[in-house]
Amino acid sequence: MSPNYTVPAVERTVRVLQALIQHNRGASLTQLVNETGIPKSSLFRILVTLNQHQLVVEDPERQTFTLGMKLVEWGSAVLDRVDLKSVAHPHLVKMAAQTGQSFYLAVLDDYEVILVDRADTPDIWRIVTRLGLRSPVHCTASGLAIIAEVTEEQLDEMVKRKGLTRFTSKTITTKKGLSNKLAEIRRLGYACADGDFKTDLYALAVGIRDHRGKIVASLMTALHRDIARSNKKLVKSLIVALIQEGENISSTIGYAGN
């Protein structure tokens, strides 16, 4: 958009808000004058207007100004409308191109995991089922990554409603075993399902967090179990890639870290 169409008063207001971002404990009128270059009388009027709309809060005792909670409300409204699939897809495509493997985006629904997006390379081994098909949570890497931080009450509810069905000799079928598995995932930062759901499937996944820090989806890749066992270097590289891109996607949808 041409700069000729910009409004100077709005530009000044944006400069004030950007300056206040740097002051967690508030900034005085004099500080803001020095940092924005806006004349004191004009700056004061801007702050008064922002204060009236709860975008800025004035502390009369300390004679400082801070950002208001209205901005949090607006920001949350924007983040709630973020289309996770659209945000994540370019990351899946990039990873597939860089590694030669396929990558998947999964979400949880009624304590079942659903693959909602994928990015493949021409030579991938198509072991993972089609998009939209539901899979159990307790024995898939994508599901385990999503439920890694659920409460005990939520875990009890999941086990009660869905059970812990055995699919292979390695499937976890007790709540204690599942709790231990989730603790390991939290410690490592990624989930691994090595023959837990399908005997020939080795899958890795990491959680994706939203702006509240809640795990809302997972990023997953899968190998044939024989390849995973014979190529530890490949497995390690995929773990690094998953963690990095999981953090990147989380950051894009608003997660600011611990």
Image (cartoon, rainbow, N blue to C red):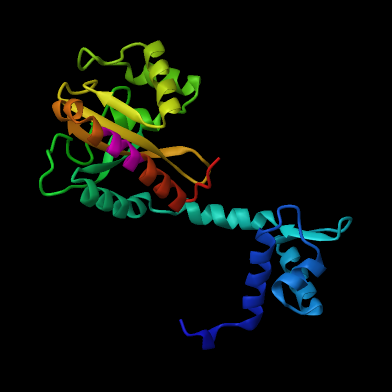
Left or right of 130: which side holds 1? right
229 is within the stretch colored magenta: no
Q: Quadrant of residue 51?
A: bottom right
**Stretch in magenta:** 235-242
Which residue is at the far front? 233
Q: Is residue 125 above or below residue 175?
A: below
Left or right of 214: which side holds 27? right
Q: Is residue 129 above or below residue 45?
A: above
Q: Position of residue 158 (x, y in %)?
A: 39, 22
Q: How many marks?
A: 0
Residue drawn at x 50%, y 47% as measured from the top left: 255
Which residue is at the far right? 61
Q: Position of residue 79 (x, y in %)?
A: 49, 53
Residue 148 shows in the view = no
Residue 211 shows in the view = yes
Report the magenta stretch's main SS.
helix
Q: Is residue 92 above or below residue 2?
A: above
Which residue is at the far bottom? 4
> Which quarter of the figure is the C terminus placed in?
top right
Residue drawn at x 80%, y 76% as measured from the top left: 40
Residues 160 and 232: in front is 232
Q: Quadrant of residue 188?
A: top left
241 is within the stretch colored magenta: yes
Left or right of 125: which side holds 117? right
Q: Position of residue 90 (x, y in %)?
A: 30, 55
Residue drawn at x 75%, y 52% as measured from the top left: 25
Residue drawn at x 30%, y 27% as measured from the top left: 192
Q: Position of residue 175 (x, y in %)?
A: 39, 13
Q: Quadrant of residue 10?
A: bottom right
